[in-house]
Amino acid sequence: MRTATTVTTVWPDATALAHAAAHLIVDISNKAVQQKGYCSIALSGGSTPKLLFSLLATAPYKNNIPWKKIYFAFGDERFVPPTSDDSNYKMAMDSMLSLVPVPKKNILAVETVKLKPEQSAKHYENELSKFITKKHPFDLVLLGIGEEGHTASIFPNSPLLEDKKKVRSTWVEEKQMQRISFTLSFINQAKQVAFLVSGAGKAAILKTLKSAKGKKLPAARVQATKTTYWFLDEAAANLGV
């Protein structure tokens, strides 16, 4: 049985970091399609992923990704309409998905209009289960990290840390917002996870993650079954590496 590994790389700035992550996505997506006929990727929100998505939608990356054979999902979503500027779906559509030849049916979005939060979480889990199974987990889950150590919508002391379901509705007190999120156990079923962390504002939490106290934080408890990647820029790595 292969041992799970963690790979940390440091790049000059957010743009260089995004290019490095784009190369990884080209590699993972093509290998997955060769091995099983399709690839599954869970996207994240935030400014650093937006930069990555914009790169993926342009040459040379756009021309080297098997878009028609990739299923895209969202690791978490704010419970807002898909037209809201707070929507991770809208950000991904505007910066990448509407600009590349991915079939609409391959975009697994969270229903935030017609259903209540709990219904939405259950519906989303059912949709994901058609494509994501224990035999065929996510090929890649993209994640970020908050300054208090949260990832996806899993905040410190969140019930999602121990929940065995795939998806849950959760009220995030820190943000005063309802969200739909993968649970920690579901994220950890993924073959590969990639954290994208940029900016000096993340340096302190990266340092904390290496401490005894930090090991209990949500981001520190993420470990993919094959490889967990940490893409950092120099500003973020200043105190963390």
Image (cartoon, helix red, strand yellow):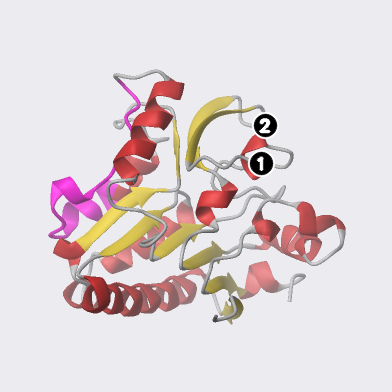
Secondary element type, mark 2: loop
* Residue highlighted by disc 2: 174
Q: Left or right? Give the position of 167 relative to 96.
A: right
Q: Residues within 10 Å of mark 1 (few under 14, many from 20)?
A: many
What amino acid type should be assigned to the residue bearing mark 2? Answer: Glu
Q: Residue at x 54, y 81 (%)?
A: 2
Q: Residues within 10 Å of mark 2 (few under 14, many from 20)?
A: few
- Give how far across and how far down residue 97 sits, in percent: 23, 53
> Which portion, as a residue range, is magenta?
93-113
User: Which is more foreground, mark 2 or mark 1?
Assistant: 1
* Residue highlighted by disc 1: 155
Q: Residue 197: name its quadrant.
A: bottom right
What amino acid type should be assigned to the residue bearing mark 1? Answer: Phe
- Give how far across and how far down residue 21 sits, in percent: 43, 73
Q: Left or right? Give the position of 200 relative to 88.
A: right
- Give how far across and how far down residue 75 sits, in percent: 45, 48
